[in-house]
Amino acid sequence: MRSHIDTVGWILIVFGIFNFVMILLISGLMLFGGGFIAIIGAGSGDSEAAVVGGVYAVMAVFVLGVGVLTSIPGILAGRGLHRRRPWARILAIVLAFFSLTSCPGLFIGIYTLVTLLDGEVADEFAAMAG
């Protein structure tokens, strides 16, 4: 089971980094698009376009914030699983339940739950805790 714990850890780290990079890309494109719209609107005297550009910029910052808040816990949980930290097992189980709502996350969530809810794994983490 040790190899499965390490595999879950790597999956969480890679998936977290991938999500973080994609969020950076999406929010960067939104910020660029919003700035472009605002500049074009301000140059042509269209105040509504400038407002739309500002809304895009605010949405980009919001998307970036949500992305960071959802990606970092997975990376931390994966790192903690490699070090066999009991808190990482709990965090990974909670994240697995949340990931059951998306298509690739469904498979990751099921594998994580099957691995980390196994009695042998629970005993190993309990032994590490105390």
Image: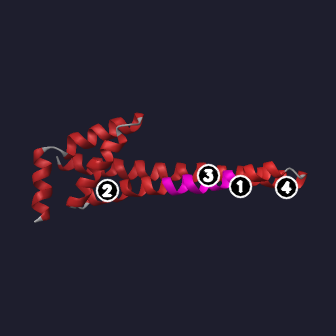
CA distance for labels 3 and 4: 19 Å
- Location of mark 2 (residue): 77
Which disc, if any, is residue 116?
none
Closest to the camera, between mark 4 and mark 2, is: 4
Question: Residue 1: x percent and y percent?
Answer: 16, 46
- Mark 2 surroundings: few (<14), some (14-19) or many (≥20) residues within 10 A: many
- Location of mark 3 (residue): 59
Per the image, label 4 sits on a secondary structure element best described as helix
CA distance for labels 2 and 1: 36 Å
| Sequence-first disc among 4 and 1 | 4
- Location of mark 1 (residue): 54
CA distance for labels 4 and 1: 11 Å
| Sequence-first disc among 3 and 1 | 1
Total numbered labels placed on residues in the image: 4
Split into 4 quadrants, where in the image is the C terminus? Answer: bottom left
Per the image, label 1 sits on a secondary structure element best described as helix
Q: Residue furthest top?
A: 103
Find the magenta span and give its range.
55-66
- Kindly identify the residue that appears in the image at 35 percent across and 47 percent down: 11
Camera sees residue 84? no
